Amino acid sequence: MKITKVEDSLTKMHNIKYIRENANDFDKAMARRGLEAQSKAILELDEQRRSIQTESQNLQAKRNEESKKIGQIKKEGGDAEAAMQAVAEIKTQIGDLEEKEKAIADQLNDLLAGLPNILADEVPDGADEDQNVELHKWGEIKVPKGPDHVEIGEKLGMIDFETAAKMSGARFTLLSGPMARMERALAQFFLDTHTGEHGLTEVSPPLLVRDNALFGTGQLPKFKEDLYCVENPKKEEFLLLKLKLKKIEEQLEELQTEKKNLTKLGLTPDDHEKEDRSIRHKKEQLQNIRQDTQDKIDDLKGKIEDKYLIPTSEVPLTNIVAEMIVEEEYLPRRYCAFTPCFRSEAGSAGKDTRGMLRQHQFYKVEMVSITAPEKSKEEHERMLGCAEAVLEKLEIPFRTVTLCSGDTGFGATKTYDIEAWLPGQETYREISSVSNCGDFQARRMNARTRPKGTKDTRFVHTLNGSGVAVGRALIAVIENYYDPSDGSIFVPEVLKPYMGGIEKIIKE
């Protein structure tokens, strides 16, 4: 695959040119997301920034003209002091404008970074999950009602919430014996199906990522509270060194003032020399300490960043093409990964507190596709089929819905949810979300493609989907394959090759 790194700085997040030309349409798009009109605030900041840029460019042209005059005056033997002063003043003005422009640009970027993706026209309007639109159902519900996975697993002695809570707190689970093996079997089955039948490339990605990776996929800055941040232990040392450096600079300034004031003290020449020598000695010592401190700061600069545990492997898989130009002939790129995922579930207090349905740590097989813009809708349907296929092979009844505007995630332009039937709850529950993000993530991570034979580039489209959530698939298997005659669990046919001869999970 031919990939080129992008060196230039490009517009991120929403397309500001589109907003300038289609302010009303943009406001309507945000209204579908339940937001007030945004274009006025955006365009006011944009106009201020562009006005300052124009003013700065005009001053730069004036500075160039004045600089030429200095050379001419000196060439003619004249006094160029006034012209040099004028150039210095212009330089100061340009510097002030650059600071002002940066402050406005930061404000504009912060505003844009917090706005969600524009929904596809075909996404149905609605306030919440109750207004999602069902596309189809698959499979016969053979077990309409039954005990839930908590009751089944605890009676088998293979799901232990109490021990997990003792070491980690709420929303953690300890699996053991054949139940733990079943979890692993599901993941292997999903991976083998996606790589062997669906043409995805398996990836084993990092579980810790930088903040820029999470910004690219849209988790930061808006959803920081849902993430687990691993603070760098050297950060405190770095901050202490910065404080020390500041104090040294203050001491050096004090010495400089002290040196200037020596003449006002009425000292004898010998005493003046003695004091001056003492100040020079202190200054030399402080300068050495300052240099040593600065060296330590420079050494730590690249080592102090915090990192985040991934909430989904969508983050590292999508960021494979961050800051890159991928030649279009090498698209689509299709990846999958089996990883643990970590979420604080900050916005889910009191929701799904029983069992494994909503955990701080869980396993998932994720699918990610990188496509040319005109291919993403077709790829979205393909990815949905990949996720549905593994559930069909498991013979788990499910239904597929199109999420309405009020339930569609921040970074998606359109999302399908697959919901598996859970007899323990007598309802369908989400087991996979498959989303087309259009160019939303690509803009944030600067991921581009170039058609063959052209120089122009354009943003790729990114898609992601669970293929599927392993923990929730385990719940579905436990509840749909439960044998009420003895409290055991039948092993689905497609999982038997992964279970080492176990055909039924029974109490040990």
Image (spheres, rainbow, N blue to C red):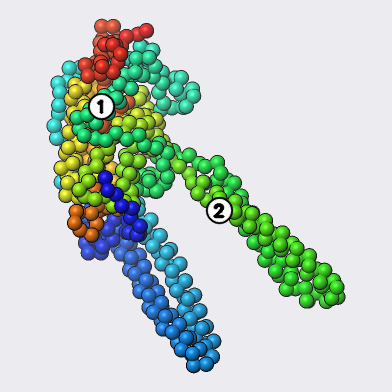
| Position of residue 152 measured from the top left corner of the image (x, y, whole percent) | 32, 14
In x, y percent, where is residue 63?
43, 80
Residue 183, numbered circle? none
Residue 167 to residue 262: above or below = above
Identify which residue is drawn at 27% across, 28% down.
Answer: 191
Residue appearing at x 39%, y 60% in the figure: 107
Q: Secondary structure at mark 1?
A: helix
**Kind of residue at disc 2:** Asp
Residue 298 is marked as 2
Of the image marks 1 and 2, the number of the one nearer the N terminus: 1
Q: Position of residue 112 (x, y in %)?
A: 33, 56
Residue 236, compared with residue 428, is above or below; it is below
For label 1, the residue is: 192
- Image side of residue 460 versus residue 209, left or right: left
| Quadrant including the C terminus | top left
Query: Is residue 304 something that shows in the picture?
Result: yes
Going 43% across and 40% down the picture, which residue do you hit?
A: 308
The answer to whether 65 appears left or right of 299 in the picture is: left
Real-space CA distance between mark 1 and mark 2, rounded to the nearest whole angstrom: 46 Å
